[in-house]
Structure formats: C-alpha cells, structure tokens
Amino acid sequence: METGKKVKVGVIGTGAIANIAHFPVLSSLPEVSLQAIYDIQYEKALEAKNRYGAAMACRTIDEFLNQDLDCAVLLTPKTVRKEYLVPLMERKLDILCEKPLSMTLKECDYLANEAEKSGKIVMVAFNRRFAPCNRQAAAAFEGKKPHLVIANKSREFKEFRGTLENAIHMVDLLRHILGECEKVEAQAVFTDPFYEDLCTAQLQFAGGGIGILTASREAGQWREHVEMYGSGITAISDNLDSYKIIYPDKEVGQTMTPMRQGWCRVVERLGFEPCIKHFIHCVQTRETPLTSAQDAFKTHELMDRILRTAGLPDLSQEWPVK
C-alpha cells in the first residue's frame, strides 16, 4: 500500500463486540478511514455511522461490496460467517473476522483454503494472543518454550457450546505458546452436552511441553488466568490486568489498571486494540498476520479433538443454536 495513504475500512455487523471494541479502536486510528457500515438492520448501521463518523451506512450487502474499500471487518454472528466471507474474498478485500471462523471444522477448512487461494489477508481476531499481560508473560522465556502452561478461562454462567465459544481463546493461546499438539486427554461434566458445566484437557505438544486447559461454567465470577513454568522461570498473567515474572532471586511485573491515571481501557487489556492494529499493519505492509485463517484452522482442529475426547458435541456438523 502507498506510504501515508489511509486504509479504507468497511465493517459488517454492529453488535456488542463491534461497539465495545472494533468501532472505538478503528475510529481512533489516524491511519484508518471508516468508509462503510452494514447491518441487516439499517437503523443500527446508520446509528453506528453517526456515532463513529463513518462515511456511509449501507442498506444492502451489495451496496457495501460496491464501496471503495481496502478491507472489511466481519462481526456477524458465528453461524453466518461463510455467507459473508466468501463474497468478501471474491471482492478481493483483506478481512479481519471475529472468532470462531466457523461452527464446523469442514467449513473452517474450506474458508482457510479459500483465503489462501484469494491471495488476500484473512485474519481471525484471537485477541488474547495480543493482550499485553499474556505477551509479557510469554516474552519472559526469551524465545524458549515453557514446559508447562496452565490456562484457565471460567465464567459464572452457562452458554450454548461454552467451551467452543469462550475457551477457544485459551486453546489458541496454548498453541501460540507451545506449538502443535500431539496428544489430547480431556474430560467434561454436563447434564446437557450443549451447555456443559466443565471442560478440562491435558495436551502434550511437540517438543514435550504440556498444556492444561480448565474451563468451568459455574464460577463465582469471570476468571482468566495463565501460568507458565520452565527454565527457572514462573510467569503469570492474571485476569489480563496484571503479570508477574518470578525468578529464583527476584520478581518483576506490572498491573495495567493504574496506567494512564487509571484509564487503561478494556480494548487495551484484552488485546483488542493491538489485534486490530496488527491487522491494519498487515494490510499496509502485506505481512502474514499472526492469526491468519490458515493458522486459525489449526486452533479449530485442536478444539475439535478436545471436544471429541471430552464427550462433547464436536465440530463435524453445525449444531442448531438453542
């Protein structure tokens, strides 16, 4: 892309994640021009246009596809990824897609292959890889892999396919830190397998590292905690708000909350802002994104193995949302 030229971005979807993370970040970046917004409810697209200063709100997807755009951010429900991703790829746009890429492994594979054939950037927003506390904790190993990573993401309520919907962030983070998984052992507790109470997994990775996943749906409150061990180092990322690196003779770390006089935003802490900035950077430089569609497929493939082994509905078919 020409140096100094603004990246022309279009956004599809105006739900919670759009308003919590994507619109606030995109509208604040000086290198971005927010050109078009589409939602199946035109009034919501118009409201977002006015609120975030976009050039226009589109009434139809065809109108959106006819705009002068460099890239698109896809924030639709996960059940309708393919019907938007394929036209966007055919339009030769770079794409940032919210996770998961799809509800089925077959469709994930198809979309990842189509993304590769398109020659365009297709990135999946696994934002936990970009969260500063996770990054600082992993960086303590200076390129080496820890021999044990314990990743917990627990919440205080059940939701449809909670492990797939929510704990997939931890599965992706374990892959990012430890590499590719060779062996899966997993258990789940449930009455209704679509609304599991608990899922745990022990994962053995190439090179010998062990990852442990825990995901309770009956916690007192949301809890997200990552511990890494190896090479005489303990590194902890706690609720994405603080990190601590423990050595035999000292401890170092930081809490995010006091930063900027207490105004460290959720889009920074949870990794949304650096994730979106990474996508825009890749659009500008043509670098392969850290969480490309092809890489995301590997995370979905591992998630499928965990679900199957735990006795939960796998990713072989698209189960209807209850």
Image (cartoon, helix red, strand yellow):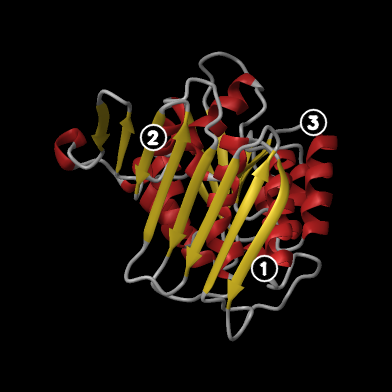
Residue 1 badge:
none
Residue 187 in sight in this render? yes
Q: Residue at x 59, y 43 (%)?
A: 210
* Amino acid beneath label 3: Gly
Q: Residue at x 57, y 65 (%)?
A: 163
Q: Is residue 16 left or right of residue 304?
A: left
**Tag 3 and tag 2, C-beta contact below 8 Å:** no
Q: Is residue 91 above or below residue 220?
A: above
At which x and y percent is residue 125?
Answer: 56, 45
Q: Residue at x 73, y 59 (%)?
A: 304
Residue annotated with mark 3: 119
**Tag 2 and tag 1, C-beta contact below 8 Å:** no
Q: Quadrant of the C terminus?
A: bottom right
Mark 3 or 2, nearer chain start = 3
* Amino acid beneath label 2: Thr
Q: Residues within 10 Å of mark 2 (few under 14, many from 20)?
A: many
Mark 1 or 3, nearer chain start = 3
Residue annotated with mark 1: 310
Q: Secondary structure at mark 2?
A: strand
Q: Residues within 10 Å of mark 1 (few under 14, many from 20)?
A: many
Residue 234 badge:
2
Q: Quadrant of the N terminus?
A: top right
Q: Secondary structure at mark 3?
A: loop
At which x and y percent is residue 25?
Answer: 41, 41
- Total numbered labels placed on residues in the image: 3
Q: Is residue 306 left or right of residue 36?
A: right
Instruction: State the residue in front, 292 or 6.
Output: 292
Q: Quadrant of residue 222?
A: bottom left
